[in-house]
Image (cartoon, rainbow, N blue to C red):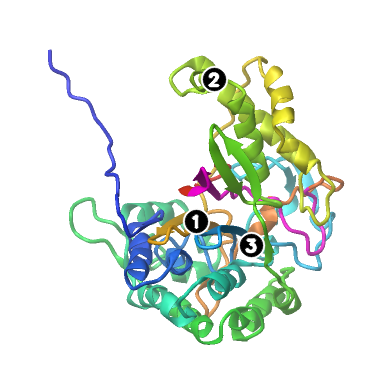
């Protein structure tokens, strides 16, 4: 008997002069075109990141946040840029009223907040960092001007993109939620319905973002100041005032990117650089250190025992994460111990516990960009609107979708990741760069929930 089997395969892209990896082919093509014009990895990553806010507008936004690792092959330097969201100045640990039960269908099972104010709407919006971080990276480590790098995203927003199945599906899934916010409905829906993608070979609806194109043009002309101190800042602040949000013009003007060395670690002969601070980097190192204490075959994908050990290592990493971690400028945590091989050995010795119940899936969200150029400069960049379609709020006449970054804070007082004025949220994003014997080897990252 002959039986056919469905095999889902993906072509492996190979190149000698550089490579761009993104969640959407059009975004990756934007970055590849920048490399072809002589741009470096940072030029390509920034161009791709801005383009992704257009081609996958539900995953990331210029009013979001992110983390970026840059490896400069010449000086051998690796630097981390933290442009994650932070709490507006008016926020404090009791800013939300608490309701019975836990949040459902969200990124975290925090205590539920009255009216789900931390999940969506104007009071879920944190101070955005994406424009500040991307423009600073380009200024310090890029080789092209901002206008050149932003031109592809501006063109895509003005001319529009053809809806693929994923955009159509996501818009349909969120139709009811988007309809509750008139400007979001006008931007992402068509006559109150989702954008259409035919089942056959015909193209889908073309969706255009003329307001966003004009906003990007302002940023291309005036830099980050247009967003944080200029007309876009005024528009964001006015929208917040009109609807009871926390974000103010002063919050935007005072936002600052954190630039620091990465966290360093190793895994089975690879040297690792991961995002520092209140990101997923420290947790990733802890998990990898624990897995490294076992033989490679003992933590493989092909056995129940290997999968169980992986699951236990991840569970312990996240237990430590929520027990200890928060903004390192506000919270004292055992950072060095959690990242140490000695601590991993202690954890590994106690992993043989009972099998727990698997949690349900977490929502998809966020986007990631990886770039290597001809000089072997590398970039790993993760940025996000936080949840799909962020806060569901689009600022009128700007096309700018706002993040719902307050969801990242634990709404209960007295926790390491509780809310405080100006505090950075504890985020999941974990860009990674790997080296073998000091040479660039791998750029790595992933979008989606706690991945």
Magenta span has 68? Answer: no
Badge 1 vs badge 3, beta-carbon distance below 8 Å: no
Report the residue marked by disc 2: 295
Q: Nearer the viewer, mark 1 or mark 3?
A: 3
Report the residue marked by disc 1: 176
Name the spot of residue 14 as percent of width and height, x first.
29, 50
Q: Quadrant of residue 62?
A: bottom right
Dominant SS of magenta comes to loop
Q: Residue at x 75, y 66 (%)?
A: 88
For the record, the magenta segment spans: 417-439
Disc 1 on helix, strand or loop? helix
The mark nearer the N terminus, 3 or 2, is 3
For this orientation, the residue located farthest to the left is 1
Q: Nearer the viewer, residue 274 or 232?
A: 274
Q: Would residue 173 be visible to someone looking at this image?
A: yes
Q: Quadrant of residue 320?
A: top right
User: Counting other residues with Cα less than 10 Å from the Cα at mark 3, is it few (<14), some (14-19), or many (20 or more)?
Assistant: many
Q: How far apart are the alpha carbons under marks 3 and 2?
A: 48 Å
Quadrant housing the N terminus:
top left
């Amino acid at each position: 008997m002959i039986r056919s089997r469905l095999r889902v395969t993906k072509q492996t892209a190979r190149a000698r002069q550089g490579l761009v990896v993104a969640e959407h082919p059009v975004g990756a093509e934007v970055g590849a075109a920048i490399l072809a014009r002589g741009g470096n990895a940072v030029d390509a990553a920034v161009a791709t990141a801005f383009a992704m806010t257009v081609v996958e507008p539900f995953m990331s936004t210029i009013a979001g946040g992110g983390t970026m690792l840059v490896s400069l092959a010449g000086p051998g330097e690796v630097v981390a840029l933290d442009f994650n969201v932070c709490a507006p100045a008016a926020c404090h640990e009791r800013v939300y009223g608490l309701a019975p039960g836990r949040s459902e269908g969200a990124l975290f099972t925090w205590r539920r907040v009255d009216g789900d104010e931390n999940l969506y709407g104007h009071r879920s919006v944190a101070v955005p960092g994406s424009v500040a971080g991307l423009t600073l990276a380009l200024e310090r480590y890029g080789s092209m001007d901002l206008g050149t790098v932003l031109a592809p995203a501006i063109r895509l927003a003005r001319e529009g993109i053809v809806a693929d199945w994923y955009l159509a599906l996501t818009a349909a899934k969120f139709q009811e939620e988007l309809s509750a916010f008139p400007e979001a409905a006008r931007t992402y829906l068509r006559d109150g319905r989702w954008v259409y993608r035919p089942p056959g070979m015909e193209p889908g609806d073309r969706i255009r973002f003329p307001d966003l194109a004009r906003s990007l043009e302002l940023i291309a002309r005036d830099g980050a100041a247009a967003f944080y101190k200029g007309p876009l800042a005024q528009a964001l602040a006015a929208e917040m005032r009109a609807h009871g949000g926390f974000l103010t013009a002063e919050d935007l003007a005072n936002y600052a990117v954190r630039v620091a060395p990465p966290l360093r670690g190793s895994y089975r002969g690879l040297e690792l650089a991961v995002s520092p601070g209140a990101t997923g980097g420290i947790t990733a190192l802890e998990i990898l250190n624990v897995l490294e204490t076992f033989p490679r075959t003992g933590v493989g994908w092909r056995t129940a025992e290997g999968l169980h050990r992986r699951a236990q290592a991840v569970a312990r990493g996240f237990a430590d994460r929520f027990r200890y971690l928060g903004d390192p400028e506000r919270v004292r945590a055992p950072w060095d111990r959690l990242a140490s091989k000695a601590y991993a050995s202690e954890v590994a010795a106690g992993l043989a516990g009972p099998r727990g119940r698997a949690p349900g899936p977490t929502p998809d969200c966020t986007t990631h960009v990886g770039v290597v150029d001809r000089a072997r400069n590398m970039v790993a960049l993760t940025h996000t609107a936080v949840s799909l379609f962020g806060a569901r709020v689009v600022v009128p006449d700007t096309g700018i979708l706002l993040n719902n970054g307050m969801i990242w804070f634990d709404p209960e007082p007295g926790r390491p990741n509780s809310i405080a004025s100006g505090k950075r949220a504890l985020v999941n994003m974990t860009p990674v760069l790997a080296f073998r014997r000091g040479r660039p080897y791998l750029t790595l990252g992933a979008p989606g929930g706690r991945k």
